[in-house]
Image (spheres, rainbow, N blue to C red):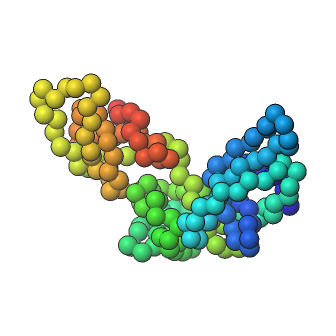
């Protein structure tokens, strides 16, 4: 058990008999009354999002999880195929609950996966990742309005808005939480 005031983003908790990951945590200390924590929790198995509020002295059940480095192999349309980097054993994670990951993970890359009782709870993707632009329309000459953007497709299939000067084959840095363009990467 852990006190609600000690809960941090990324922790795994057991709520109503189901595992949840803390996606957001807000600590509130009102001028009058006791402090409390507002939590946004996500179920990795169903994708359901819960919003819970606990007084800081309330106890919540924290679950023991194991983090392992795993190499992403491929997506078959229904599940993600991974391999443990230490044992080379392959396993599958169903897409349900991890729909957003399809366009963020690159084949061959290593990601940290959180497990609870051999069940994957979370796939950690770096906050910023470099992707190659695979499809981009050419900018139209004279289309130089301030902040002009266009939609491009990245190597994973993710479609995002970028400035009009980005061309096919270039590398761009993307914020994986917001799926937004940060900057062009010169290599």
Residue pictured at 35% horizontal, 53% vertical: 158
Residue 71 in sight in this render:
yes
Q: Is residue 119 left or right of residue 128?
A: right
Residue 19 position, x and y percent, is 69, 68
Viewer can see residue 108: no
Q: Position of residue 64 (x, y in %)?
A: 77, 64
The residue located at (16%, 29%) in the rendering is 143
Q: Is residue 78 above or below residue 157?
A: below
Q: Nearer the viewer, residue 86 or 48?
A: 48
Q: Quadrant of residue 108?
A: bottom left
Quarter that holds the C terminus? top left
Residue 147: x and y in percent read 29, 28
Q: Residue furthest left?
A: 141
User: Hey, which quadrant is residue 74 in on the image?
Assistant: bottom left
Residue lying at the far right in this picture: please name it. Answer: 57
| Residue placed most toward the observer, 162 or 69 | 162
Question: Where in the figure is residue 161, as x and y percent of width and height?
Answer: 32, 42
Answer with the quarter of the image where residue 113 lies: bottom right
Q: Residue at x 35, y 34 (%)?
A: 184
Measured along the vertical axis of the image, is residue 177 above or below residue 70?
Answer: above
Q: Is residue 16 left or right of residue 43?
A: right
Closest to the observer, 79 or 108 = 79
Lateral position of residue 62 relative to residue 145, left or right = right
At x 50%, y 47%, the residue is 177
């Amino acid at each position: 058990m852990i006190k609600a005031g000690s809960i941090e983003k990324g922790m795994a908790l057991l709520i109503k008999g189901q595992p949840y990951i803390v996606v957001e945590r807000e600590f509130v200390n009102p001028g009058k009354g006791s402090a409390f924590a507002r939590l946004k929790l996500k179920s990795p198995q169903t994708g359901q999002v819960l919003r819970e509020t606990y007084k800081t002295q309330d106890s919540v059940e924290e679950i023991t999880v194991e983090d392992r480095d795993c190499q992403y192999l491929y997506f078959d349309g229904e599940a993600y195929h991974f391999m443990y980097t230490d044992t080379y054993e392959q396993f599958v994670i169903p897409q349900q609950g991890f729909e957003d990951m399809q366009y963020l993970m690159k084949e061959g890359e290593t990601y940290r996966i959180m497990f609870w009782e051999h069940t994957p709870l979370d796939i950690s993707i770096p906050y910023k990742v470099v992707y190659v632009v695979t499809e981009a329309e050419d900018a139209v000459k004279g289309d130089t309005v301030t902040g002009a953007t266009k939609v491009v497709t990245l190597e994973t299939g993710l479609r995002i808005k970028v400035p009009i000067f980005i061309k096919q084959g270039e590398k761009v840095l993307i914020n994986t939480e917001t799926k937004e363009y940060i900057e062009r990467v010169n290599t």
